[in-house]
Amino acid sequence: MRVAGYTDQNLYYNVDGKPHLDDGMNISITHSYEFTAIIISNEPVGIDIEKLRDKIKRIAPKFIGYEEEFVTELEDAIEPLTVIWGGAKESMYKLYGTKGLGFKAHCYVEPFEMDLNHTISRIVYNGDNFKYDVYFQRLENFMMAYILPAHNA
């Protein structure tokens, strides 16, 4: 935060635990093992980083719905599953910042190709229907993703 000109005193959390900056800029924070990432934007934003692990295959039924159709066909599903869960859906949850949002029921990720480092996601919840650009990148044995509102919604 210091690199962006902020201190801990500029940061506060709402009742749902979503971080905010006192100047109205949007912030999202993530960490996993030795990695930490913060993204600050004048638009709503979410970021997440997750370690690539086989465990993702076991827990996938908790967070994928229709996405199963295009992921389970892949020989190595660890990276795309991590993009869907640890990237897109965790980032959507952080951006939306409202309790009750379900990964399977309300967060959707469109089919994507890993080498493009981009996909589209949607939140459909409580009458809202928001579209987001998801940008993802592998960092060592981790997958990081951040989302911003799609401007061609």
Image (cartoon, rainbow, N blue to C red):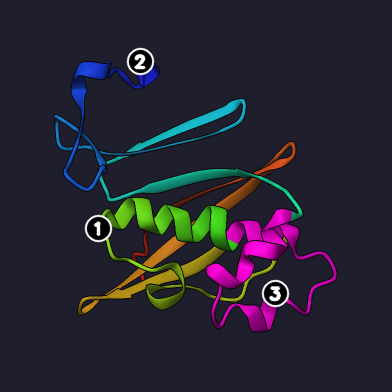
Residue at the spot 15% in from the left edge and 37% down from the top edge:
24
Q: Residue at x 74, y 59 (%)?
A: 78
Left/right placement of residue 47 relative to residue 55 reads left
Q: Secondary structure at mark 1?
A: loop
Tag 3 residue? 71
Residue at 60% from the left image edge and 72% from the top image edge:
61
Label 2 near label 1: C-beta < 8 Å?
no
Residue corresponding to mark 2: 2
Q: Main secondary structure of the magenta part?
A: helix
Q: Amino acid at mark 2?
A: Arg
Q: Secondary structure at mark 3?
A: helix
Residue 93 horizontal side relative to residue 110, left or right: left
x, y percent for residue 42: 25, 43
The x, y position of residue 57, in whole percent, is 71, 64
Label 2, residues with CA under 10 Å away: few <14, some 14-19, many ≥20: few
Q: x and y percent of residue 62 in the render? A: 54, 69
Instruction: Give the magenta range.
Output: 55-83
Q: Which residue is mark 1?
A: 98
Other-residue count near label 3 (Cα within 10 Å), few / some / many at <14 / 14–19 / ≥20: some
Q: How many marks?
A: 3
Distance of label 3 from label 2 (alpha carbons): 39 Å
Question: What residue is at 47 percent from the left and 61 percent from the top?
Answer: 89
Amino acid under disc 1: Thr
Residue type at mark 3? Val
Report the Cα–Cα distance between label 1 and label 2: 27 Å
